[in-house]
């Protein structure tokens, strides 16, 4: 484990060359103030008080060379993010001065922080439990307001509180049972029914928490959607129309490859990465085969494939060829919700059309009519996508908080162990059998909150953080 005795330093803000107007260098640890005093010259009579801003210059103590003009924010333990002495230099945002400040801090005795090390210290020093620490990383990574909101709820302890309570309940039950193992003669007999009832109660709460995991996963990682179809059916027009309709566009990544255009949208609170496989063309030409190959990869990697066809022409042989090339029939067998038909150019149809008019050869398949040209029906497309992913009637965007995958896996473990306890009670097995699985449940809950956690678990969690957090 990384030693807590070191004073650590990192750039705490995102640094983009020649952009950004402030860059923050953060120091944390016992030597933070001494290092700051060694580098920072504050003119006049500015007191080095906690939670005050000082104005001055950072200079190289060896050469007296001035490195940057900066503000200094002092946050003395325990009133800081890490509960240690923390100093922040708010520098002009250029790469060069900010990196020089870091180097000077290292020369003065600090060590470069590992990813997540500030938050790790906040956890180790008891300021955050493990679910709160994980929420910090989730907040940084959030790609939609809904994802940010559940991360913030986690940071505020909305997840930690019920989990700690469940662990306390299990610990109390364990104590009650283990007392019978040790002092059977001095205590009234166990009320097995009452214990089983309490365990059922815990299981019901665990079930409710687990129900948030799937929606949380959607909000965090979002969905990948691939737009496929033969040339000229309107794939690119659809992506353009969709991007324009959706006011919550996050980014627009122009052609990552020659043949695939990506866009980021947010639909119903869920971040959606849309891949437009503009290059697809069924052909013998080797170069163009590459385009088909990329489309196939995109379709394979997508959670949902939007198969675009021209509604005014209905299903054609060329549509069928691409449908076969992409093996979409097989795909639907594995996951029935993976393919959505998009009948574009609805504006060319004489009257309200329905699926029968398209003469689709396959078994009933979810189909949306729209017009990319007139930008009508995009809302139907979004509703259809949400219907496909909300198979279990969950409303991800309305979640108050949500488990992440690690937490869900542990809670499933808790649930499993508690079921074993109930079996042991039911089968009137000796008390040791009850306590083995109850111990396992308590341990899993402790790994969740961090009250009982190994170094390797911590390493796994914090290595995913960015540096400076
Ligand atoms: P892609 O090759 O599948 O990407 O198709 P494009 O988006 O380039 O569109 C091909 C042609 O169809 C263009 O001339 C578009 O203007 C036209 N188009 C696209 N969507 C519609 C639509 O909804 N209605 C009509 N009438 N034309 C459309
Ligand atoms: Zn089992």
Image: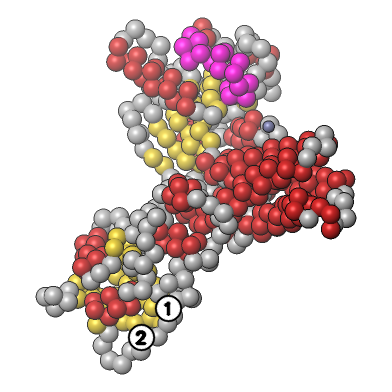
Q: In the rendered structure, does residue 445 fall within the stretch colored magenta? A: no
| Tag 2 residue | 48
**Residue at the extreme bottom:** 45
How many numbered badges does the structure rendering display?
A: 2
In the image, 324 versus 312, the foreground residue is 324
254 left or right of 305 in image: left
User: Label 2: few (<14), some or many (≥20) within 10 Å?
Assistant: some
Q: Is residue 146 above or below residue 259?
A: below
8 left or right of 249 in image: left
Residue 395, located in which quarter of the rendered image? top right
- Residue at left 39%, top 40%? 253
Per the image, label 2 sits on a secondary structure element best described as: loop
Judging from the image, the colouring scheme is secondary structure
- Residue at left 61%, top 48%? 443
In the image, 134 versus 58, the foreground residue is 134
| Tag 1 residue | 76
Per the image, label 1 sits on a secondary structure element best described as: loop
- Which stretch is magenta? 321-341
- Residue at left 61%, top 15%? 333
Q: Is residue 352 visible?
A: yes
Residue 466: percent from the left, percent from the top?
A: 39, 53
175 left or right of 239 in image: right
């Amino acid at each position: 484990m990384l030693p807590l005795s070191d004073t650590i330093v990192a750039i705490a803000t995102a640094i983009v060359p020649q952009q950004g107007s402030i860059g923050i260098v953060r120091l944390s640890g016992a030597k933070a103030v001494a290092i700051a005093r060694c580098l920072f010259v504050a003119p006049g009579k500015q007191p080095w008080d906690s939670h005050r801003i000082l104005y001055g210059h950072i200079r190289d103590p060896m050469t007296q060379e001035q490195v940057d003009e900066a503000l200094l924010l002092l946050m003395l333990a325990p009133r800081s993010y890490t509960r240690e002495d923390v100093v922040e230099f708010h520098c002009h945002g250029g790469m060069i001065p900010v990196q020089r400040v870091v180097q000077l801090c290292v020369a003065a005795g600090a060590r470069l922080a590992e990813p997540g090390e500030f938050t790790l210290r906040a956890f180790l020093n008891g300021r955050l439990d493990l679910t709160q620490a994980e929420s910090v990383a989730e907040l940084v990574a959030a790609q939609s307001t809904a994802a940010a909101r559940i991360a913030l709820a986690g940071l505020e302890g909305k997840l930690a509180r019920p989990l700690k309570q469940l662990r306390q309940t299990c610990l109390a039950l364990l104590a009650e049972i283990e007392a019978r193992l040790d002092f059977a003669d001095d205590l009234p007999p166990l009320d097995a029914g009452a214990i089983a009832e309490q365990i059922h109660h815990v299981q019901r709460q665990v079930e409710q928490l687990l129900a948030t995991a799937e929606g949380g996963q959607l909000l965090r990682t979002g969905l990948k959607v691939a737009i496929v179809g033969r040339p000229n059916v309107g794939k690119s027009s659809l992506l353009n129309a969709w991007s324009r309709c959706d006011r919550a566009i996050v980014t627009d990544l122009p052609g990552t490859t020659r043949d695939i255009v990506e866009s980021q949208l947010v639909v119903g609170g869920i971040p959606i990465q849309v891949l437009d496989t503009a290059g697809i063309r069924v052909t013998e030409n080797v170069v163009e085969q590459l385009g088909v190959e990329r489309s196939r990869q995109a379709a394979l990697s997508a959670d949902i494939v939007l198969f675009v066809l021209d509604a005014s022409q209905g299903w054609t042989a060329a549509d069928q060829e691409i449908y076969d090339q992409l093996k979409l029939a097989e795909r639907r067998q594995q996951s029935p919700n993976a393919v959505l038909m998009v009948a574009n150019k609805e504006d060319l149809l004489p009257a309200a059309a329905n699926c029968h008019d398209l003469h689709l050869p396959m078994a009933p398949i979810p189909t949306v009519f729209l017009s990319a040209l007139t930008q009508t029906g995009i809302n139907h497309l979004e509703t259809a996508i949400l219907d496909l992913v909300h198979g279990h009637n969950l409303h991800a965007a309305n979640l108050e908080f949500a488990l992440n995958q690690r937490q869900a896996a542990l809670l499933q473990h808790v649930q499993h162990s508690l079921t074993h306890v109930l079996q042991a009670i039911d089968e009137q097995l000796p008390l040791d059998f009850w306590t083995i699985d109850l111990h396992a449940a308590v341990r899993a809950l402790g790994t969740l909150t961090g009250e009982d956690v190994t170094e390797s678990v911590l390493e796994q969690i914090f290595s995913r953080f960015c540096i400076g957090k």
